[in-house]
Image (cartoon, rainbow, N blue to C red):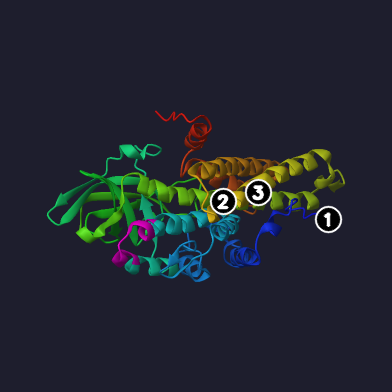
């Protein structure tokens, strides 16, 4: 055949030699260290902490940042790494996204030099884990309503409140917490072990089970003045970090979709019914073609947005376009793949239903489909319709 059945348009050929090397390196790591046991981790609801240092050695934490032990890679290269990580599991990509695009980016962008030196090299190496506390139990899509407060007490700050659905929360060495002060929203670095700061892991999840999701609880939590992220003022600061995380998601969804598609193709070619592989039946081929079309469109979308970002021309609406489109496409592909695998598709032996379950969370975190739809609606009409 003159075309690659997994990449019909050859989107992967559009990348540079260095970008393809990054893809190959991360893919090999995933194949060796994650794929053989990810089904068991998902079933048990566990995450192997030892992977963190290995991911640090791989260089994927904050790889798009410069200095402080970070790789300084292009946005496209970072996206490709997210794609390969999520081909294994959304929880793995979530760990890397929250570490690099949220916690590390907040410190890199808004922190003091002392804060950067203390945390960024350790986080890049995987010697320290970060989390990002913005979402609250009653305020998800509307973070402006946050109730977590920060009040001055002499030279110190006292934080009270709670953050919910925080990836990495239970294992984080430092939490980036956003709170409402008298002068507006501020960011704070809260190290684990700080008096008044506790975490509680969220159990009984049916999605992102190979990922730690927690509640952050701040009860008269006293922080010194140097805990403030002095460069991050107002809601625009945390939202700018969220946009970085959403960018990684639009790439990661392509990886999950590709893995479901590949699994379905391989299964269809080996599953015999009525005396022949089910890949030889027209209805199965129609399903595979529909999946391939959506996969390639999502892949091209990610590639184009990556190039826009590298050129400094990426608007938040572009990221909303990619996140909304690509996660929708990935979910559709995962569900269709499950029908090809039939009963086999509901076990952890195959990845498709695990991906589908994970993508249900990816669909709504870092901005729900409704919010991204309204972002694009405003971009089209020039009229905001959030309230």
Q: Give the SS element for disc 2.
A: helix
Residue at 37% from the left image edge and 44% from the top image edge: 135
Magenta region: which residues?
A: 106-116
Q: Give the SS element for disc 3.
A: helix
Name the spot of residue 368 as percent of width and height, x first.
48, 38
Front-most of 163 and 314?
Answer: 314
Residue at 34% from the left image edge and 65% from the top image edge: 116
CA gap, disc 2 and disc 1: 30 Å
Q: Give the SS element for disc 1.
A: loop
Front-most of 375 and 352?
Answer: 375
Q: Is residue 115 magenta?
A: yes
Q: Is residue 64 above or below residue 133?
A: below
| Marked residue nearer the N-terminal end (1 or 3) | 1
Q: Which mark is residue 308?
A: 2
Is residue 254 something that shows in the picture? Answer: no
Q: Which residue is mark 1?
A: 2
Provide the major secondary structure of the magenta segment: helix
Q: Are marks 1 and 3 in contact (CB under 8 Å)?
A: no
Q: Which residue is mark 3?
A: 300
């Amino acid at each position: 055949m003159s075309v690659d059945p997994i990449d019909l348009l050859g989107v992967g050929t559009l990348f540079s030699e260095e970008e393809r090397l990054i893809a190959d390196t991360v893919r090999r790591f995933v194949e060796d260290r994650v794929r053989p046991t990810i089904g068991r981790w998902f079933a048990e609801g566990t995450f192997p902490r030892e992977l963190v240092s290995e991911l640090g050695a791989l260089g994927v934490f904050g790889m798009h940042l410069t200095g402080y032990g970070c790789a300084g890679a292009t946005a496209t290269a970072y996206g490709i790494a997210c794609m390969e990580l999520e081909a294994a599991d959304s929880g793995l990509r979530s760990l890397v996204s929250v570490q690099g695009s949220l916690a590390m980016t907040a410190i890199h962008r808004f922190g003091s030099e002392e804060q950067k030196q203390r945390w960024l090299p350790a986080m890049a190496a995987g010697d320290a884990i970060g989390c990002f506390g913005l979402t609250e139990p009653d305020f998800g899509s509307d973070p402006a309503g946050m109730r977590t407060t920060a009040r001055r007490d002499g030279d110190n700050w006292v934080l009270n409140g709670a953050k919910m659905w925080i990836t990495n929360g239970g294992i984080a060495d430092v939490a980036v917490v956003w709170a409402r002060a008298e002068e507006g929203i501020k960011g704070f670095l809260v190290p684990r072990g700080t008096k008044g700061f506790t975490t509680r892991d969220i159990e009984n999840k049916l999605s992102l089970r190979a990922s730690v999701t927690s509640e952050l609880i701040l009860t008269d939590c006293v922080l010194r003045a140097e805990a403030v992220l002095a460069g991050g003022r107002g809601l625009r600061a945390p939202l700018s970090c969220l946009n970085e995380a959403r960018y990684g998601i639009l790439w990661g969804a392509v990886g999950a979709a590709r893995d479901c598609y590949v699994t379905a193709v391989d299964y269809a070619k080996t599953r015999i019914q009525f005396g022949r592989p089910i890949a030889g039946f027209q209805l199965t081929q129609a399903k595979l073609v529909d999946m391939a079309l959506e996969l390639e469109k999502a892949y091209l979308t990610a590639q184009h947005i990556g190039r826009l970002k590298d050129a400094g021309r990426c608007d938040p609406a572009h990221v909303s376009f990619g996140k909304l489109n690509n996660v929708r496409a990935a979910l559709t592909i995962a569900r269709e793949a499950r029908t090809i695998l039939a009963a086999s598709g509901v076990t952890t032996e195959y990845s498709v239903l695990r991906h589908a379950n994970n993508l249900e969370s990816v669909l709504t975190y870092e901005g729900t489909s409704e919010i991204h739809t309204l972002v694009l609606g405003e971009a089209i009409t020039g009229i905001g319709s959030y309230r």
